[in-house]
Image: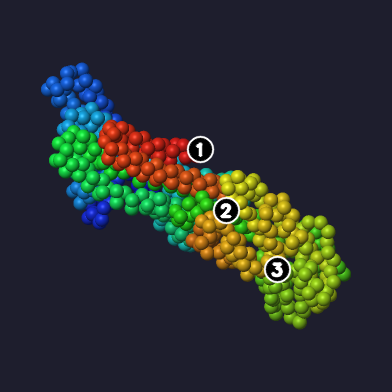
Amino acid sequence: MSKHLSEPKKKNPPRRQGKSLRGLEVLRIYPDNGADSEGYPAGWRIPVFLLSALLLLLVSLFFGRGTPIRLVLSALSFCLSAFHIVLNLMINFRGGRFLCEALPVLVAAVIGFCTGLIISSVLILMLYQLLKLLEILAVRHQQESGQPILGILPQSATLIEEEGDDRTLRKIKPVHIRAGDRLLVQPGEIIPVDALVEDGVSSVDLGPLIRGKKIVPVAPGRKVFCGCRNLTVPLTVCASANFNTSAAPRVYSSFTATIRKESEDERLFVRVSNILYPVLLVLALLFGLLVPLFTKNWIAGARQAMVFLLAACPFAMKNALSLAVFSGVSEIFSAGILIREIRVLFSLAKLETFICNKTCTVTESYYSVRSVNPSGISDDALLAVLAKAESRSSHPIARAIRKYAGVPDGYSVKDFSCEEIPCKGISARIGETEVLAGNATLLFDRGINCSVPEGQGIAIHAAVDGKYCGYIVLENTVREGNYDAIEQMRALGVKNFALLSGDLRSVVRPIASALNFNVVKAELTPEGKANAAAYLSSNRTQGKTLAYAGDGSHEMACVPPDSLSVTTGALGDGEASRADIVILGESFVRLPAAVHAGRASSRLSFLSVVVHFSLRLLLILLALLGVCPPLLASVLLTAAAGASFLFASWFFSRL
């Protein structure tokens, strides 16, 4: 993607040193801030020059054809229309860039002026300049649409310095923060770095970072993320990371790194243009000079040459394609979603199969204990047995049991060893005592009879030395909005939705039915999930994409090759560097926005390339037949490029 789309506007940009020409490069003229390629301000002067040129051209029409005053006024109008084109050509020539975008337009206009097509020549230059002005406005519009992403970056931080009993506060730049620094965050301020709360009980708005509405309470010991906003009470925090490795800078760096890369359509456009450009220049030379030597029809040859020259000019289509891609990427990031590279945008456009892990993706990341049902022991004794057995497990069910039993994380049990049995539970040994904690299948496999509870929920049974002790029932609610998200993706063309889980079928099937999944696999080991995903991948349509949504590195291992990995809620983890798509919130409810953006960008980019080259082939054919006026060719090429800019900027969200 064009570099200028990713950089914020700068005042008085410095001149860049010219680079040597490597191959045949199609060059841009006016970058993002209304300046030419070397930094000369041009955007505000283009309308003034064009209006002056148009006025002189209209005045010249009141004088007779061939009169000196008409020729002078027409020449002045021509010079005003060509001023910025000549200026940029001089800059590019000085930098060693000779095959510039505007060169064929200027040469065609000069030929037309010399052969009597004065009005057409001036209008050709004016149309090209109007297109460049539209390019400036479209790029500025897209830069403004990306400004909210900059808003997540803090501008300053308050450092707490202590010497003995003295405490001083000092304003510093966030880039100067180092891990271990103590900072004061006032209400209304952006948290400047990922940190742990040391003092203060407040509420933090995650909205600026995850691009949604979510307010969470924080207290001492709670982790907070850079880019979130403190709301109520001043907080004293201790930086747990440097600024550059914190959440907000990582999000912004991911955005800028993505939009700096070119898409396949952009690279295709450049490759084909670099072939057409010299070919059409040769054709212009052939029909403008060599053919008229035999036909003696110099005027017709000149007009054919003008059409070939105009067809050689890319008419800013490279930047129009960049804007189409930039629009899609901006919409995705505005929805609180990170993508690793540009190819992901176009892979989303071809998404056919969407696979979800149940826990922490379809359902909430936490469980809650609904009831305790002991057998031969008390409620507290049953909870104590389960809490000890689950003391070293990181599974959300284990955390819920420990929390309900009042056992803190990190609680250690002496003489403890355990074995996790996939999809069944845990076999633990505490001293000489054997404890089983898991589903009914685990106990039945060991020859222990247990009660089978009725109703929905997950039952975790316990047995001590082969004696059944009862069970507890936990519930895990479906995330709000997931049903609507699935239906929206189905409306966008995603056909297959699969739910994979290690839980019992009796637990998984009601959830899958409620969310309208058409493929359900339960009681799967991690290897079983990988095999199921591989089977679905092998049965997808050629050229279509499969996406696998999970919540951790163990789920990423299940993603088949040439598929998209999706993770949720990865603000403080390393998931952003591993997954293709990172949803900053805890639900895939925003994923339809990414699919929509991918389809819109892909459709617009493809149509722009097809229309651009189809139009050029048509103009070449008409020029060979001698039936295409140069002004008509300029109007068609300008209209095609202008329409691409308009759709890529203002009308993108309506596609």
Q: CA distance from mark 2 to mark 1?
A: 23 Å
Q: CA distance from mark 3 to mark 2?
A: 29 Å
Q: 360 or 203: nearer the eye? A: 360
Give the number of the disc on residue 352: 2
Q: Amino acid at mark 2?
A: Glu
Looking at this view, name the residue that lies furthest to the bottom.
432
Name the residue carrying label 3: 423
10 Å crowding of disc 2: few (<14), some (14-19), many (20+): many
Q: Secondary structure at mark 3?
A: loop
10 Å crowding of disc 1: few (<14), some (14-19), many (20+): few
Marks 1 and 3, the one that precedes in the sequence:
3
Q: Position of residue 484 (x, y in %)?
A: 64, 45
Residue shown at 29% from the left, 51% from the top: 275
Q: Is residue 522 left or right of residue 559?
A: right
Q: Is residue 37 left or right of residue 407?
A: left
Q: Position of residue 245 (x, y in %)?
A: 46, 59
Q: Amino acid at mark 1?
A: Arg
Residue shown at 71% from the left, 65% from the top: 523
The answer to whether residue 368 is seen in the rendering is no
Give the number of the disc on residue 654: 1
Q: 305 or 43: nearer the eye? A: 305
Marks 3 and 2, the one that precedes in the sequence:
2
**Is label 3 or label 2 in front?**
2
Residue shown at 22% from the left, 47% from the top: 282
Q: Position of residue 115 (x, y in %)?
A: 17, 32
Are discs 1 and 3 less than 8 Å apart at CB?
A: no
Q: Secondary structure at mark 2?
A: strand
Quarter of the image where one finds residue 134: top left
Give the number of the disc on residue 368: none
